[in-house]
Amino acid sequence: MDTTRRWGAALRASLLLSAVSLAAGASDVRLADAVMRADTQAIRALLEQKIDVNAAQADGTTALHWAVRHDDLDTANLLLSMLDKVGVHQESFGDSTGKLEI
């Protein structure tokens, strides 16, 4: 009986830690998913909702990564303009003129 209790306690602790980890690392990745699918309508709708442009999928891929991977300059520029609105400047991604070179 003692072994059963220990296994039960260990299982409960493991489940609790998993739930806490998921909650702490959870972010809204709908924008990255939409850019991954090249779903322009969803991208615009999500940006209108002021969704987090920097939210990353489980592997760290962001919407901007997907836009660049798809050679989608329009979406990349749209995402960069949204970053500008929250205080991240394009100079971080391009040359001193702020132009993005892809």
Image: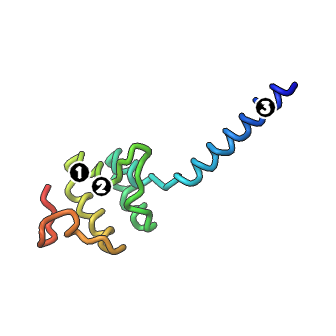
Residue beneath the point at 77% across and 36% down: 9
Q: Residues within 10 Å of mark 1 (few under 14, many from 20)?
A: some
Q: Position of residue 34 (x, y in %)?
A: 38, 50
How far apart marks 1 and 3 lie (CA) works out to 50 Å
How packed is label 2: few (under 14 Cα within 10 Å), some, or many (20 or more)?
many
Residue under label 1: 68
| Tag shown at residue 39 | none
Q: Which residue is mark 3?
A: 6
Please tell me whether residue 46 is drawn above or below residue 66 in the rendered image.
Answer: below
- Say which residue appears at 44% left-offset and 63% top-offset: 51
Residue under numbered circle 2? 64
Mark 2 touches mark 1? (CB < 8 Å): yes
The local secondary structure at tag 1 comes to helix
**Corner quadrant of residue 37:** top left
**Badges 2 and 3: C-beta atoms under 8 Å apart?**
no
Quadrant where the image shows the C terminus: bottom left
